[in-house]
Each structure stands twice: as structure tokens, then as C-alpha cells.
Amino acid sequence: MDIDQVKRVFESKGFVQTRENPESIVEFRSNENGEYVYLKKDQLRSGYIRIVLHPKFGSVYRALVGDERDIPWNRSSNLYQFPERVHTGKSPIHYGLSVEMYSEEALAAFLADFQFPKF
């Protein structure tokens, strides 16, 4: 998948790019409500799109998947706008909810239909 095409999907759905780590992640902010979403660039080479949402959306994720599966957390020091917690090390690290999409169309539908509520 092409990174520039994926970025255009975000832009077409009202997100503005606010930061980019050249090797791993792109930060977007919604013009509609100010929520942040991260795009994991390294997953594009594997043929799918991984986005990371604020951890407060964990309950929404559980409601959407309809079961009590473990929430797929993503941990990265590059998730600047998200909270930190200690995972396996001694220092806290930023974390968020990892969601995978398998096409640009699926990403566009998700960004259009999933209205990020203010918590």
C-alpha cells in the first residue's frame, strides 16, 4: 500500500497530519473534534493498515467486536498524545488501541462512520 494514498484518505475524512516519524508513525488530528489517530507506517509493507486510537475507546472496541477478547494495545514512545503506563519495563510508555484495516476503502469507511465521541 502506498503511504501517500493512505494519508489522502485521512485528509479526505477531515484529518490533518500533525506529526510524522520518518520510519514508523504518522499523527493525525480530527478537524471535527480534535481527537488524535496514529497510522503505523511499518504495517503498510505487510499489506494492511494499522491505526492506533486513544485507549479511552477500548469499551467502544469491545462493543463493536461483541465479545471480551483482549484489547489489542499498541505501545510506542511516538504516541505522544496518548497516556502512559508501565507495561513490562520500569518506565511508562504511551499506549493506544490498535485497529487493522485491509484496504483504503475500509479505512475510509471507518473514519467516516466511526464518530469519535468526546469523553
Image (cartoon, rainbow, N blue to C red):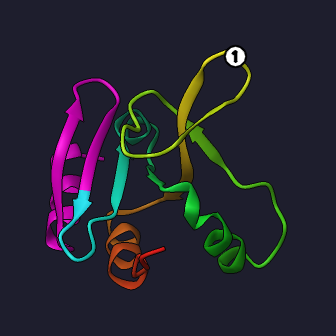
Query: Whole-percent x and y of residue 15?
Result: 20, 64
Quadrant position of residue 30: bottom left
Residue type at mark 1 is Gly
Q: Is residue 33 left or right of residue 113?
A: left
* Residue for point 82% across, 73% down: 67
User: Is 29 drawn above or below residue 78 in the view shown?
Assistant: below
Range covered by the magenta-colored residues:
1-28
Q: Where in the figure is residue 36, as x and y percent of width and height?
A: 33, 57
Residue at the spot 69% in from the left edge and 16% down from the top edge: 89
In magenta stretch: residue 29: no
Tally the numbered discs. 1
> Horizontal and vertical percent for residue 49?
42, 51
Q: Is residue 37 left or right of residue 4?
A: right
User: Crowding near pointer 1: few (<14 within 10 Å), some, many (20+)?
Assistant: few
Q: Residue lying at the far top in this picture: please name it.
A: 90
Q: Please report the residue visible at 17 percent of the width from the left and 70 percent of the height from the top.
A: 31
Assign a secondary structure to mark 1. loop
Picture layout, residue 59 above or below residue 92: below
Please state which of residues 64 and 103 is positioned toward the viewer in this rendering: 64
Q: Which residue is mark 1?
A: 89
Q: Residue at x 82, y 61 (%)?
A: 69
Q: Residue furthest right?
A: 68
Percent across and percent down for residue 78 are 38, 31
* Up-down relation of residue 44 to residue 100 (above or below): above
Q: Quadrant of residue 16?
A: bottom left
Q: Is residue 97 above or below residue 74?
A: below
18 vs 42, left or right, is: left
> Is residue 21 part of the magenta span, yes or no?
yes
